[in-house]
Amino acid sequence: MIIRKPFQEKWKPILIGLISIFLMIGLYFFMSFRQHEINPKDTTIPTITQLMKGFSKITAVSHRGQTWIGQDSKATLYRLFLGIGMSVILSLLIGLSMGCFAFLEAFLLPINALLAKLPPTAMLAVFFVLTGTDTTMFIAMIVFGLTPTISQNIYLAVKQIPMETIYKSYTLGGNSFEIVYKIIFKMVLPAIIDSIRLSIGPAMVYLIAAEMVVGDVGFGYRIRIQSRLLNMSVVYTYLAFLAFFGFFMDFLLKYIKSRLCSWQRT
């Protein structure tokens, strides 16, 4: 087997990926079957029937005309997108500044490296005191958790650009702003998109953790309440929704990258 040798047929990696997913699903239902042979009333590993009941519960319309999944999705996704959006904007400013200007690199890099090592979940008490327990707190968790990491990735991507490219840009009459926007930003755009892709998972971790502690609506809140009641069919359904949402976002960002950065295709 030759290292990094690609498949000749495009359908093979898709087929192998589907097989791996079906194997994982099959393993789950095998474990569920074995567990219910031991204890037919078990709810820790729900069967397909129990999962369907859980799905019916979260999609049932209340007397207010609302569903659990609708309420929680609206709250969680709003917090998530707003937090990620603010993180990306701040990371762009910090990462490009550190990568392009020596003074700002010397000033910001130590602080950025220090903050990147602080786990956001350990800062929950600080966020409670500073921002309260409303939407601001959830967004602050995501921004604090993502910004140092994404900005460092952007900084490293900028540092990998050859100095010859920058010198040639100055020679052709470009000023610093034009070079940063038209040359450097476009060259590091693939790294920026990849950093966002890799940050979706951690962002959901920070948000769900905060919602589990102080949320009154959202996925974390619902998972906490239902797990206490041992309604694992609801919990597993919510986890499946989160997994598919993360997969969809990753696929969407890969598509956006292929459209905006077609020159990087291999």
Image (spheres, rainbow, N blue to C red):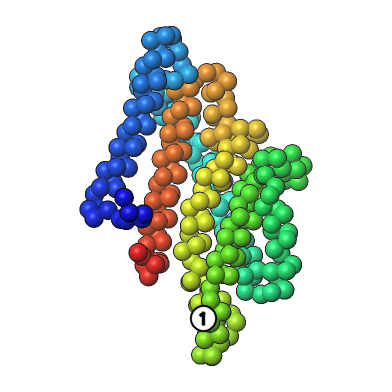
Q: Amino acid at mark 1?
A: Thr
Residue drawn where x is 23% and y is 55% of the image: 8
Q: Secondary structure at mark 1?
A: helix
Q: Is residue 137 above or below residue 171?
A: above
Relative image position of residue 93 (x, y in whole percent): 62, 66
Which corner quadrant of the image does residue 132 belong to? top right
Tell me if residue 210 can be seen.
yes
Relative image position of residue 67 (x, y in whole percent): 45, 31
Q: Is residue 250 above or below residue 262?
A: above
Q: Is residue 148 above or below residue 128?
A: below
Residue drawn where x is 41% and y is 45% of the image: 247
Residue drawn where x is 46% and y is 16% of the image: 43
Which corner quadrant of the image does residue 265 belong to? bottom left
Q: Is residue 179 left or right of residue 35?
A: right
Residue at which label 1 appears: 165
Quarter of the C terminus within the rendering: bottom left
Relative image position of residue 223 (x, y in whole percent): 54, 29
Which corner quadrant of the image does residue 48 belong to? top left
Residue drawn where x is 63% and y is 49% of the image: 145
Number of dots carrying numbers: 1
Q: Is residue 13 left or right of residue 46?
A: left
Relative image position of residue 193 (x, y in whole percent): 48, 59
Q: Nearer the viewer, residue 142 or 197?
A: 197
Q: Residues within 10 Å of mark 1 (few under 14, many from 20)?
A: few
Tell me if residue 139 can be seen.
no
Q: Is residue 7 left or right of residue 167?
A: left
